Image (spheres, helix red, strand yellow):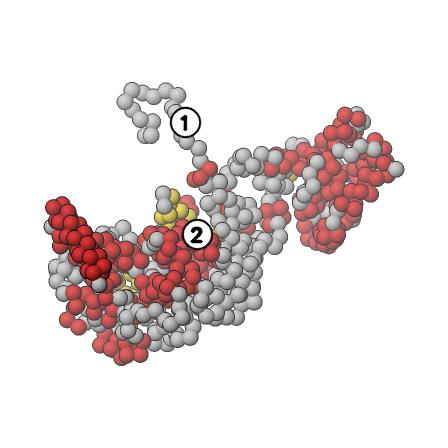
Amino acid sequence: MKQQSLFATAVCQVSRRRLLLGGLAFGSMGLLAPRGLTNTPKASDVTDFLILSEFLTGRKTLSVTLARRYYLGLQDQFPDLAVRIANLSREIHASGVQTMDDYLSHGPSPEARNTATTIVSAWYLGVIGQNPKKQMIAYSDALMFQAVAGALVVPSYGAGPLAWGNRPEPYMMLKGVSDEQ
Amino acid sequence: MRKISTSCSTRVAICLVACSALASLLPKAQAADVTLAEKGRYIATAADCLACHTAPGGKPFAGGYPIITPVGTIYSTNITPAPKSGIGDYTKTEFFDAVRRGIGHNGKRLYPAMPYTSYAAITNDDMEALYAFFRSEVAPVEQENRPDNIRFPFSIRSGMALWNWLYLDTRTFQPRPGETSQVARGRYLVDHLEHCGTCHTPRTLFMGPANGRALSGSVVGAWYAPNITTDKIAGIADWTDSDLRNYLTSGHAMNKGQAAGPMAEVVTNSTRFLTPDDVDAMIAYLREVSPIASKEKRSRTSYGSTEPTEDIARGQTNPDDRGWKIFSGSCASCHQAQGQGINVYPSLTHNSATGSTNARNLVATILTGVERQTGENAVFMPAFGPGALWVNRLSDQDIADVSNFILKAFGNPSVQIDARYVEKRRAELTP
């Protein structure tokens, strides 16, 4: 009972709006795909990828647009992506866990762990794959910045004068010379 | 009977004591003058004389500020008490006539760029105080006035007599029957001292205020002074009292609008110095103004983000939208990637400048930037127009592209502009 439930519950959790958006995403995919991608994914592939990503990252509000772009990019770099995702999903199903932490302590197979790491690192870094085929997808919305958004501002973005701290005391100073110059 | 006379005599006694106490500190007349002049300073602040009578970077009240009108550029005059170029030799009557009747020295007619039609209702008491302030508290500066370049037929100043006959109401302020004292005070401030209608009321073909359309919004040079009536869509009915209070005292109302351009000057020089009671009075009166609708279907503050533009375009080797690129390079570091703003940096969604039916305030803000003093803090947005640092300057096409992107992604998508539009606004900002 518990086993079959992960994806079923996950699908239920996905709102109708989101599924609709997924459909729309699929519609516009041809426009977005670089260099005329031949193996265009089905809308349900992107939705499945989004649901899987939300499980892997433990987040509930990942961007549909980014999910689509990560999926396309990963598919470009890993032709066996669909199979790998299917294997990973099956393993999660089989383990019957409810959270990523439980899954990790349950002991995933090296292949599944590898797929999970690839997907999670894409979401966190905003970058897909390895050199020389690295591809940038997101910057300010990369999860590594979102994780600390309450305290830190994304580099090169500013939070305004009210966010500036006091100037630290200089470590050392020449006698009588202010370091302002 | 006896009781009254006793209390009278007590009061006289108290007065005598008070007077002699004052007299021992200061000569009596001088003390009264100081109080009167201080009252005058507040009137001058509420009437915002400083904003127009001071050139950018110039001496206070020495004039030379260009006022760009559809009929030419008018330079404000020197109103320091300097005898030659200022108003040092104005008698009290001449001063009263200049402020309330638009009649300068030797009967020379002033242009209504000087809002004497609004000031006409200033009470005699307030005029006395204003006169005392300008005589004793303003430093005299000899600085010659710049000639105007007003086009015919408006260049004939005597024609203003006819104009005055049409548009000048010479009655001083009287509370209306049934009006609360707070609303009356607010009306005195909004319609007369602060002369809000000078910018916010549209003008007729003869440059007079359009009757029946008071405060319903008007073009002001490159800028647009929006509708501030109580209309549910076109006006400011959706602004809460605290939104309006924040706007008048700091120039920033969260998710409503920010003061830039001439309105930033108003906040910097005038409204932020008003007493809390006076600000509340202005708000109370603004709630009573008749609603005047315009053609728009949605309130200008109602537009939110439509699509996750940052998610779509970041990392693409050739993002379709050139405007997004410019936004990302020039705007996003403060207004943030999705235009959501942060801390003092306003959001571009739910913003009067981006949700308006015209792009004037958006383009003028990009061209000139924002400088506004609010309390201890200065609000600053860099300019991207001709006054900007070389590295920041944007071309007309750049500004058109980035404006179109902002309007589509965060504001009113039905407004779109081209480089010619920006070129015209640039010209309007150059005196």
Of B67 and B39, the residue lying toward us:
B39
Image position, residue B67 (x, y; %): 31, 63
- Relative to A69, residue B112 above or below: below
Image position, residue B256 (x, y; %): 49, 55
Image position, residue A171 (x, y; %): 39, 21
Of B331 and B119, the residue lying toward us:
B119
Q: Residue furthest front?
A: B2
- Relative to A9, residue B410 above or below: below
Q: Which mark is residue A38?
A: none
The residue shown at (19%, 65%) is: B95
Question: Quadrant of residue A1 in the image?
Answer: top right
Left/right placement of residue A101 relative to residue B281 reads right
The residue shown at (62%, 52%) is: B307
Q: Are marks 2 and 1 on the same chain?
A: no
Looking at the image, do the residues carrying marks 2 and 1 touch, with CB atoms under 8 Å apart?
no
Q: Please tell me whether mark 1 sits on a helix, a strand or a loop.
A: loop
Q: Can you see residue B368? A: no
Which chain does tag 1 point to? Answer: A
- Relative to A145, residue B400 above or below: below
Q: Which mark is residue B246?
A: 2
Q: Amino acid at mark 2?
A: Asn
Category of crowding for the residue at label 1, using alpha-carbon neighbours closer than 10 angstroms: few (below 14), some (14–19), many (at least 20): few
Image position, residue B166 (x, y; %): 31, 79
Q: Report the residue marked by disc 1.
A: A168
Q: Amino acid at mark 1?
A: Pro
The residue shown at (53%, 37%) is: A153
Of B428 and B397, the residue lying toward us:
B428
Q: CA distance from mark 2 to mark 1?
A: 33 Å
Of B35 and B260, the residue lying toward us:
B35
Category of crowding for the residue at label 2, using alpha-carbon neighbours closer than 10 angstroms: few (below 14), some (14–19), many (at least 20): some
Which chain does tag 2 point to? Answer: B
